[in-house]
Image (cartoon, rainbow, N blue to C red):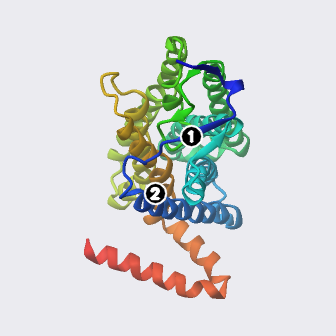
Amino acid sequence: MVQANWTSVTMFFFLGFSHYPKVEVIIFMLCLLMYLITLLGNTILISITILDSHLHTPMYFFLSNLSFLDIWYTSSALTPMLANFVSGENTISFSGCASQMYVSLAMGSTECVLLSMMAYDRYVAICNPLRYSIIMNRRVCVQIAGSSWLTGCLTALVETVPVLHLSLCGNSIINHFTCEILAVLKMACVDTSVVQLIMLVISILLLPLPMLLICVSYAFILSNILRISSVDGRSKAFSTCAAHLTVVVLFYGTALSMYLKPSAVNSQEIDKFMALIYAGLTPMLNPIIYSLRNKEVKMAVKKLLMKNPFSTSLLLSLNNIGKGTHSSR
């Protein structure tokens, strides 16, 4: 079997969804739709958090960071896939593959830490409302966001560098639609136990531990909410946490199924579809989830759209869709 180092490889070939030729076009259209909605939704969310002074709060500061990394992650994963489908080449360069692997790992790791920090922000807001502005001041928020990004970028570097030093087998064909680290590891000719151990340690640090912090935060939040006598107060407290909890379940559920699944479960085709959900569906749903029942975000979006005369019809359409969804429930 032919062996090659990463440095001697100039091009990789993706198998993608070539085993399903009848649904490739459908997958392409769905990915394109998810990507466009992700760009639009997250860009609007970032814009309104910057332009609307009422949203200059820690929660929306963290939310804008989440939207920014979602754009980066989805772009790194889906843009090459969409471009390859149009060109019909299904290839990526060595530098492109290394960059794609690093960016996807960095953005995913950063989101793990950031979501746990957002849970802490909700804990302070509900359990210590009088001291909220003091505890979560601008300096602390910047430090929390900065540490999340730094942790994600450093852990991604620790995972990526060892993989780039492995000897690869075969003809540089990656059985995936992106340079996903688990798919690349399967091309290695040498023992990858050290790399897998590094990945396992980092996965434990970035998945179960942040989840533990989230669970502890929400245990205190729930205990505090149950002591609120007002029904409106309880409803408002629950609504501020519902969106974050939904995003946490969606993100961590997909991540755990990908990176901490039993070794006996080894289906590359399942991994591809899970990666599609992780890279496309979750970032697309995040801005929708956070704005669906959020009056502040809805008002900010209306203000932003009203400034543009061509957006009136779009706003009316969105309102009609919302009314139709509400009536169907």
Q: Quadrant of residue 113?
A: top right
Q: Quadrant of residue 134?
A: top right
Amino acid type at circle 2 is Leu
Residue displayed at 56% across by 40% down: 13
Q: Is residue 322 above or below residue 30?
A: below
Q: Quadrant of the C terminus?
A: bottom left
| Residue farthest toward the front in the current orientation of the protein | 1
Q: Is residue 57 above or below residue 224?
A: below
Whether residue 300 is visible: yes
Dot in front, 1 or 2:
1
- Report helix, strand or loop for mark 1: strand
Residue 254 is situated, as x and y percent measured from the top left of the image, at: 40, 40
**Measured Cα–Cα span from mark 1 to mark 2:** 30 Å
> How crowded is the residue under tag 2: few (<14 C-alpha within 10 Å), some, or many (20+)?
some
Amino acid type at circle 1 is Phe
Q: Is residue 92 above or below residue 55?
A: above
Whether residue 63 is visible: no
Is residue 25 found left or right of 77 in the rendered image?
A: left
> How crowded is the residue under tag 1: few (<14 C-alpha within 10 Å), some, or many (20+)?
some
Q: Which residue is mark 2?
A: 285
Q: Which residue is mark 1?
A: 13
Q: Is residue 283 above or below residue 151?
A: below
Is residue 2 found left or right of 289 in the rendered image?
A: right
First along the sequence among labels 1 and 2: 1
